[in-house]
């Protein structure tokens, strides 16, 4: 009993976990991962660009440079390019090598929530 009010104390109501009250947690970013050259290559993008990709809009960006057999390579991720919704082509180096050519829906995708 509370000595100030003379009432019994009420236990605190449990608070729902974030996102558990019917509202989904906010998407912070998405990481896409593919493998080529016996190595994993990843790209993390924000929710706005992820929505563009899912809507079938063309979008591309540079990925992180990486080292292979002592040489450094840059890569470029091209989503939904050349009128092909759902496509993903990843090119690397200056000679136009392709690390991946397929559908973005088939790559490993990890969503990160706030």
Image (cartoon, rainbow, N blue to C red):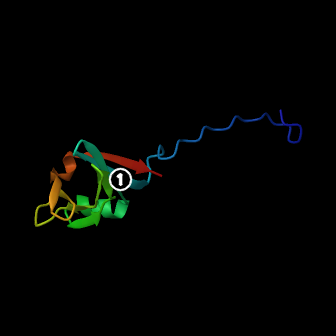
The image shows residue 55 at horizontal and vertical percentages of 22, 62
For this orientation, the residue located farthest to the right is 3
Residue at which label 1 appears: 30
The image shows residue 69 at horizontal and vertical percentages of 27, 49
For this orientation, the residue located farthest to the left is 83
Q: Is residue 46 left or right of residue 102?
A: right
Please tell me which residue lies in front, 6 or 54: 54
Residue 80 seen from this side = yes
Q: Is residue 11 above or below residue 92?
A: above
Question: Dot 1 lies on which element?
Answer: strand
Please tell me which residue lies in front, 35 or 3: 35
Residue 86 seen from this side = no
The image shows residue 7 at horizontal and vertical percentages of 81, 36
- The quadrant of the rendering that contains the N terminus is top right
Residue at horizontal 48 percent and vertical 52 percent from the top:
114
Residue neighbourhood size for the residue with mark 1, other residues' Cα within 10 Å, grouped as few (<14), some (14–19), many (≥20): some
The image shows residue 36 at horizontal and vertical percentages of 21, 46
Please tell me which residue lies in front, 11 or 99: 99
Residue at horizontal 89 percent and vertical 37 percent from the top:
3
For this orientation, the residue located farthest to the front is 70
């Amino acid at each position: 009993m509370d000595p100030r009010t003379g009432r019994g104390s009420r236990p605190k109501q449990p608070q729902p976990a974030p996102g558990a009250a019917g509202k989904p947690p906010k998407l912070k970013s998405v990481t896409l991962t593919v493998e080529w050259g016996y190595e994993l290559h990843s790209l993390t993008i924000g929710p706005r660009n992820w929505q563009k990709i899912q809507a079938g809009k063309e979008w591309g960006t540079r990925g992180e440079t990486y080292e292979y057999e002592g040489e450094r390579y840059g890569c470029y991720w091209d989503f939904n390019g050349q009128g092909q919704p759902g496509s993903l082509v990843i090119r690397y180096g200056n000679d136009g090598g392709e690390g991946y050519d397929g559908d973005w829906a088939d790559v490993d995708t990890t969503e990160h929530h706030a």
